[in-house]
Image: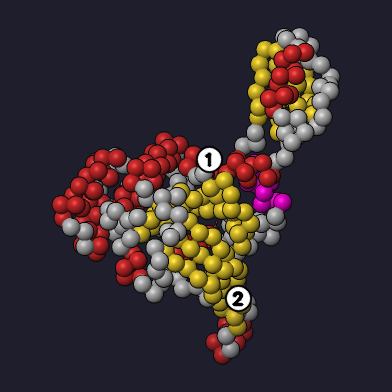
Amino acid sequence: MPHIVVEQLIKTYRISERAPGFAGAVRGVLQRRHRTVEALSGVSFSLERGELLGFIGPNGAGKSTTIKILAGILRPDGGRVEVSGRDPFQDREQHVGRIGVVFGQRTQLWWDLPVGEGFDLLRDIYRVEPARYRRTRDELVSLLKLDRVLDQPVRQLSLGQRMRAEIAAALLHEPELLFLDEPTIGLDAPSKLAVRDFVRRANRERGTTVLLTTHDMHDIEALAERVIVIGHGRVLADSPVEALRSQVLAERRLVVDFAHEAPTRIALPGVAVLSREDRSLVLGFDPARTAAAALIAHIAAEHAVEDIRLEGLAIEEVISRFYAMHGAAEA
Ligand SMILES: Nc1ncnc2c1ncn2[C@@H]1O[C@H](COP(=O)(O)OP(=O)(O)OP(=O)(O)O)[C@@H](O)[C@H]1O
């Protein structure tokens, strides 16, 4: 049985509107006007135990709404959602004990309490058995390098320290499923690496299922094998990261540095010179017409070559092209 099953999920928000100015305020009191925003318009996917899924999409696509539904915080207006065979909203009490949630923009710790005391409170809330709690806490404190901040109130922590504390807090009760909503937002490079490394280990070593949303495509490249792209409340793609790359870019690039002046053309089907400098060429080629290996073999047989490398588009470029292709970004 999959860990998460989501079928045709629908969620609409009602927003009250009022006309500007005093008259608008008065009219608003007498007669409320509402507008609806369809955040999810039929989202379907499933996730197996132990998977690490990148859940991406432009601003306003519906990612956080989906996570809130999966976490049992929001009730969907339509469709089916099951996590470990349970309805997250209906079975909230059992559900919260099995999941961990990190919202990068919000804290689940107590602002004025020292980090260590916040952890102890979570132990009580989740009713974690004391010996087990100590073991898990000590492990998390050491892996996430939190020993020096345990006595500090959360409000005094740097963003990187706070995020590491948040991740530890979400894992103290050893959840089998972890939702990470923008866990690396605003972090410096070493902190990002530390968070990524930790998430990878939790997934590989403990088998924790992870659903990760992020705008940082390096997170995706470093962690996710599979991505779901959502836009305008719908799933636009659900595929391995590599497949997405080739879906966006049929053409691939080969850069060749020659030991002599670069030729002006390479006479093979589907191969074009994209740019040329005295000793180097950038070639675009369609791998369906000429495979990379055949192209490289052809060039090496005909010319003295100093260096040759295949170039893919950076994942960031792949995703932004994908959003553009599907008109996924907000207008
Ligand atoms: N509490 C709310 N009340 C009204 N509208 C909301 C609420 N929460 C989200 N929305 C709207 O629902 C849509 C989806 O929002 P959601 O936060 O799920 O997107 P997201 O993909 O997480 O975006 P981002 O990348 O900007 O965080 C947006 O149009 C948003 O304005």
In the image, the segment drawn in magenta is 317-325
Q: Amino acid at mark 1?
A: Glu
Counting from the top left corner in percent of width and height, residue 57 is at 58, 54
Q: Of the residues under marks 1 and 2, which one precedes in the sequence?
A: 2
In the image, taking residue 273 as reference, residue 331 lies left or right, namely left
- Vertical order, 55 against 272 (above or below): below
Counting from the top left corner in percent of width and height, residue 177 is at 38, 56
Q: Residue at x 67, y 41 (%)?
A: 246
Beta carbon of the mark 2 residue lies under 8 A of ligand 1: no
Nearer to us of marks 1 and 2 is: 1
Q: Is residue 330 visible?
A: yes
**Observer-nearest residue: 81 or 108?**
81
Q: Main secondary structure of the magenta part?
A: helix
Q: Which residue is the site of mark 1?
A: 221
Q: Residue at x 29, y 40 (%)?
A: 143
Which quadrant is the N terminus positioned in? Answer: bottom left
The local secondary structure at tag 1 comes to helix
The local secondary structure at tag 2 comes to strand
Q: Residue at x 33, y 60 (%)?
A: 98
Query: Which quadrant of the figure has residue 300?
Result: top right
Counting from the top left corner in percent of width and height, residue 266 is at 81, 22
Which quadrant is the C terminus positioned in? Answer: bottom right
Q: Which residue is the site of mark 2?
A: 36
Q: Amino acid at mark 2?
A: Thr
Query: Which quadrant of the figure has residue 87?
Result: bottom left
Mark seen at residue 311: none
Residue most toward the left? 131
Query: Which quadrant of the figure has residue 158?
Result: top left
